[in-house]
Image (cartoon, rainbow, N blue to C red):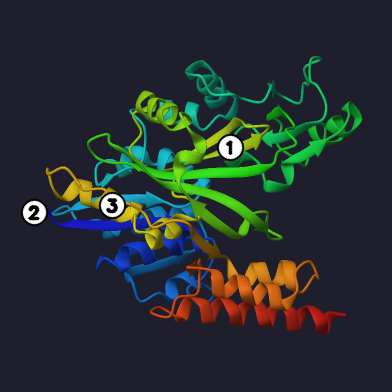
Amino acid sequence: MKNIRVYILGHDHYNTYGIIRSLGEKGIKSNVAIIGTSMKDSFVLRSKYIYKKGAFPTKEESISFLISEASVCETNILICCSDDAEELVMTYSDLLKKLFILPVCDSIDDQKSYMSKSFITKLAEEIGFSVPMTWKVENRKIPDSVMFPCITKPEISTLGRKSDIVKCLNRVELENIVYDKNRCSNFTIQQYISFEKEISILGVVLNDGTVVFSGCIDKIRTCMIGTSSFACMVDNSIIGDYKKKLEKLLSLTAYKGLFSAEFLLKDKVLYFLEINFRNDGNTYVSTKSGINLPYLYVQSYLSQKKIDIPTPKLPCYFMLEIEDFMSNVILGKVSLTEWRHNFLQSDCCLVYNKFDKKPFLKKLYTFIVSIIKRKLKR
């Protein structure tokens, strides 16, 4: 049996905490590097499931921490919890690959290609996915063939912001986004689908190439940061034969690690949007349903034996509790009675956990303080 150390690179975000908690509940304490905050301000680093930890204002300092802590006597597995953490690993791959098992494709050049939205959607279309009509904008040059309504997305997620994702009804609105020099210069423009459901599927590619799917996230409610705040994990049969197509896409990339893929459902047609070659923020929901994706990934490096994949208990409801309350109850979109019912209906929360309360208490304290400060400024 090998000795394994797990290292987690990400932001002070429930995405990062979901991995820490999933592994911690299996008795694995992680070494965690948090980018862009301090030890004092981090809620993630309050978790009892951490072995060694560090919070760093710069990305370079987080890489130095990982390298200094890596043990040459053990197998070190590095897990990324954001797009820029993934990009950081690619930037320093020559140093890191000597010490860590990295969540990348066959080569770093391949990985960079797969992070391009236009590249991956073209590959998905060739495999047989239904894909919204897509156009590429380079150096702010808009193709004449763009149809409306459409939606803009940064060609590479790490080179843009969520605010660059905008629905445009006509060419004037599109030009206002693309020609804005405060935004990224390269976009993917996609046909806007007036969808009935947003669906994402979570999974992991194990050491031997086996693809494991946990279930699909069916969004019920979103919050101010644009993510699911009350939702349900359902059986992945909802995506039909797309499951096999996803397996083919992943095999072509030779990727190993945690991933998620996003779709839109309209008139019984499922449209492929993108695949994220990193941990998804909702991974802990898989763990709660009975398929602990991070643990399965680590386990696949521990033993040569084929891993038994458990059957999830679905549906599994979950809530991003503080954000959902702030975005929907405080703003009057949902009544307190309905929210309380949804909270009690949830099988898990993405931050609150009765066995590891300190991260939630820290995050709640931070929210309360920020509200008081805002009121005092008025």
Residue plotted at (68% across, 47% down):
162
Question: Residue 1 shows which numbered tag?
Answer: 2
Local crowd size for mark 2, using a 10 Å CA cut-off: few (<14), some (14–19), many (≥20)? few
The three-letter code of the residue at mark 3 reads Pro
Q: Nearer the viewer, residue 351 or 315?
A: 315
Mark 2 to mark 1 CA distance (whole Å):
39 Å
- Secondary structure beneath disc 2? loop
Residue 76 picture location, percent across and down: 24, 52
- Secondary structure beneath disc 1? strand
Write down the residue under mark 3: 310
Q: Is residue 287 left or right of residue 344?
A: left
Residue plotted at (62% across, 78% down):
366
**Marked residue nearer the N-terminal end (2 or 1):** 2
The three-letter code of the residue at mark 2 reads Met
Local crowd size for mark 3, using a 10 Å CA cut-off: few (<14), some (14–19), many (≥20)? few
Write down the residue under mark 1: 263
**Marked residue nearer the N-terminal end (3 or 2):** 2
Residue plotted at (75% across, 74% down):
335
Look at discs 2 and 1 and give the one toward the viewer: 1
Q: Is residue 199 visible?
A: yes
Quadrant assignment for the C terminus = bottom right
Residue ranking furthest to the left: 1
Look at discs 3 and 2 and give the one toward the viewer: 3
Residue plotted at (36% across, 54% down):
312
Q: Mark 3 touching mark 1, by CB under 8 A?
A: no
The three-letter code of the residue at mark 1 reads Phe
